[in-house]
Image: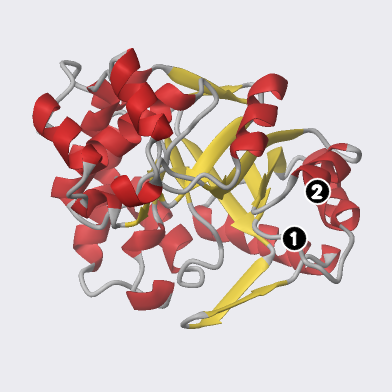
Amino acid sequence: MAAAPSTQPAAAAGTVRIGDLTVNRLGFGAMRLTGAGVIGPPDDQESALAVLRRAVELGVNFIDTADSYGPAVNELQIAEALHPYPDGLVIGTKGGLLHERRGEWRQDGRPETLRASLESSLERLRLERIDLYQLHSVDPTVPIEESVGALAELQQEGKIRHIGLSNVDARQLAQARSVATIVSVQNRYSVADRPWEGMLDACEREGIAFLPWFPLGFGELARSRGHLAELAANHGATAAQIAIAWLLRRSPVMLPIPGSSSLEHLEENVAAAGIELTDIEFDELSGSAAAAL
């Protein structure tokens, strides 16, 4: 496994701005610390808490969660493991996507729902203000301007520091920016799955942080037997680490948030911040078809 020389390897990839906040450019997605299907608590709660604490020890200072992970379980885990929070730790959470049964996700972007969700997140996370609050998914029955407008009101009340979006297209981003300052976009993206190249380029132009969810696909990249695996062998690394290194090289506004419920995989993922791909390696991966990876 490749390792960065720093005692806090997450810092090896540099930093990215989220509004007026600066975080190391390798975060942690906490969703996988919940139970099966992102419902309920995990089988081993103490292990989940240990993963969160170790992530911070490794220099991770951005943690991504949502009120729907569990639901509620994930935010409570973060507070139990890390509160009182260390200086510089940024927690981003989300509202507007309900998840009460395994496999069922339902958008609810009504202003009253978002306000109630935000208040509950503040209580669970033991915070007076959320550093980054993201609209988890656009509700097709509610104009995005109304949903984001509600978040802007909460921001004016001092309960949200910065507003972000998740699962949006270019038109929705423009509509949201007409009513609030948007500092982040979180869409599905990985070296093998790039439906949002245009969105990433737009974020880079505008200085908006881009958080790729499922940065390792659905886990298949970690099991690669193709070109990723070949490059991994050359670097003495894992295929997952090469996939993360590619993301970090792809754009300076990229903030990967790989998640894991395993201490071993957490340390592997964070160590990817210390891997530098050559121009040829990056170009080869960028031009490869998903099936070849």
Q: Is residue 91 left or right of residue 111?
A: left
- How far apart are labels 1 and 2 at the CA level? 8 Å
Q: Which residue is most to the bottom?
A: 101
Mark 1 = which residue? 138
Residue 109 spot, x, y in % from top left: 78, 65
Graded by Cα atoms within 10 Å as few (under 14), some (14 to 19) or many (20 or more), the crowding at tag 2 reads some
> Which picture quadrant has residue 53?
top left
Give the residue displayed 45% in from the left and 19% down from the top.
15
Secondary structure under tag 2 reads helix
Q: Quarter of the image containing the N terminus? A: top left
114 or 287: which is nearer to us? 287
| Residue at (29% x, 72% y) in the render | 42
Determine if residue 269 is in view.
no
Looking at the image, which is closer to me, 264 or 171?
Answer: 171
Circles 1 and 2 in contact, beta carbons < 8 Å: yes
Question: Is 181 rendered above or below residue 28?
Answer: above
User: Residue at coordinates 46% horizontally, 82% vertically from top-left?
Assistant: 102
The residue pinned by badge 2 equals 172
